[in-house]
Image (cartoon, rainbow, N blue to C red):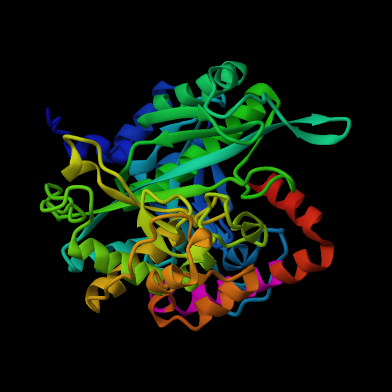
Amino acid sequence: MVIEISLADTLFPSDNGAMNSKEILDDVSHSDIRLIRFLYCDPAGVIRGKTVHASQIQSKLDEGVGLTRAQNAVNLFEDLIQVDGMEPVGEVRIIPDHNTYTQLPWLDRTSSMLSDLREQDGSQWGGCTRTVLKNAIAKAREAGIQVFAAFESEFYLAEETETGLQPWANGPVYSSSGMDRASHVVDEMVDNLTEQGFIVEQAINEYGPGQQEIVLKYTDALGAADQHLKFRDTIRGTAEVNHGLHASFAPKPFADGIGSGAHLHFSLWSLDGKTNLLHNPEAQTEISELGKNFVAGLLENMPAVIALTCPSFVSYQRLQPHSWAGSTISWGYDNRECAVRVASPFTGREAESINLELKTSDGTSNPYLALAAVILAGLDGINKKMSPPKPAHRDPALLTPEQQKECNIRPLPSNQLEALEALEKNDVITSGLGELMLRCILATRRAEYARASKEGDDWARKATFSTF
C-alpha cells in the first residue's frame, strides 16, 4: 500500500500557518511572555543572539536589534580575530524571521526567533550565514530543484563528577535498558520539541555510553537548518536547566569514546513538491541520473565541503576508518563507511523516501553553511553533467587496490587546516560564500587551529564540548 504524505505536512512549523507580527504580539501578551530571544548562528557554528523584553517587542519585530560587526569575528574558542570588515566599528541589525517564533518549554515566559543579519538599510550583509543558504536555495530553484533535508543528530549526556565530566545513563546500543535509563530526560526532550511544533521520528540510545540520538522529520532546506538550531537549544536547555546534566553535540567529546555526527539527509524535489528527482522509476533502489550528477559534484568538491560540514579542530578526530563517519571521498548504497550514502527507500514508498545522507557532517557545523556547501557542490555536478565513480560495495578501507581505483577512493583532508586550504582553492564553494564570509571563515578557523595545536587535543575537546 502506498501512503501519500504531502510535503506541506513536513515543513518547519512556521510554514504551516506562519505567524505574523500581530499573532506574535498576541501570543506574547496572552502567554505573559517576558523575554524574546533574537537568535542567529555565527560562522563558528555558535548560536548567539540578544534578548528583547516584551515591553519593547512591537518595534523590534520589524526594526531588529543592533549588533557590532565584530561579533561574527569571534571564533569557537571565544577569541576575537581581526577580520577586515568585521571590526568593532559600525553595526548590522538582527532581523527576526517571524515564521520561526516558538515558546521555549524548558524556560519560564521565554520565546525565541531565528534571525538574519542585515545592513541598516535592510540589504544583505555578507557576514550572515542564513543569507548564504538562502542564496544557495535560490540557485537550486533556478535549476528547477527544491531541496529538502534533515539533520540526524547524535549527542552525549554527561554529569559532573569528582573526576570531571562523565557519560550519564549508559546502556547497550539500541537497547531497551539504555532507553529506560535515560527515559525521563529524553522523554522530556521529545515533549519540548513536539510542543514547539516539530515532528519527532525517532529517539534512541546510541553506541557510546551516554550517547543519544533524536531524529526530526525532514523539511525544506532553510527550515531544516532553522529547526536544527532550535533542536540544539532544546536538547541542551532541557538537559542543563531541568536536569543538571550537560548535553554536547561535539564530534569527539571523549578521547576513547565513540564520535557523534550530525548526519545530513537530503533529497531533491520538483518545485511543485510532487516529484522526488532522486527517484529512478526503472530501478527503485537506485538513484536517478540527476541524482548521480549531484553525487558526483558533491564528491568532486568534498575536500572544500567538509571545511564547512566538519569545521572544527576536533572534527578530524572523528573522521577515522571503521567509525561509520565517512573517512574517505566515496559513495555507496547503504554503505555507512562512505562519505555519501544512498539511503535505501521503504517498500511501497520508494518514490518519496529515497534520499542521500552525508556522513561527513557533525554538530560543530553551522547548518546554514553546511547545507549551502552541499547544494552548491551538487549543483556543480548537475551543471557539468558529472558522473560519479563506481559505488563502493563495502567498507572502502577493505577494498582491494584495484577496487579502490575503480571507485576512485581518495583520502579526505586529515585536519582542519588542510580542509581550509581546500576551501580557499575551491571556486564553486567560495563564490557561494562571498568574499567577506570566506575571509571570516579562513581567519577565525585558522586561529582555532593554531590555538588548539598549541593547547593540545584534550584542551580542544573540553573547549568544544562546552560550546556545543
Q: Position of residue 226 (x, y in %)?
A: 41, 47
Task: Answer whether residue 253 is visible to the viewer in this image.
Answer: yes
- Above or below, 93 relative to 112: below
Q: Nearer the viewer, residue 424 or 124?
A: 424
Identified at 59% across, 35% down, the residue is 207
**Where is the N terminus found, in terms of image quarters?**
top left
Identified at 63% across, 48% down, the residue is 250
| Residue 237 forms part of the magenta stretch | no
Q: Quadrant of residue 242?
A: top right
Left/right of residue 293 with respect to residue 275 in the rendered view? right
Q: Nearer the viewer, residue 3 or 347?
A: 347
Q: Quadrant of residue 15?
A: top left
Identified at 41% across, 41% down, the residue is 58
Left/right of residue 452 with respect to residue 82 in the rendered view? right
| Residue 441 forms part of the magenta stretch | yes
Q: Nearer the viewer, residue 140 or 173?
A: 173
Q: Nearer the viewer, residue 280 or 23?
A: 280
Q: Position of residue 101 (x, y in %)?
A: 39, 38
Q: Residue furthest right?
A: 162
Q: Position of residue 13 (x, y in %)?
A: 31, 36
Q: What stretch of residues is rendered in magenta?
A: 431-448
Q: Quadrant of residue 394?
A: bottom left
Q: How many numbered discs, if any? A: 0
Task: Answer whether residue 309 is visible to the viewer in this image.
Answer: no
Q: Position of residue 32 (x, y in %)?
A: 47, 23
- Above or below, 139 relative to 230: below
Provide the major secondary structure of the magenta segment: helix
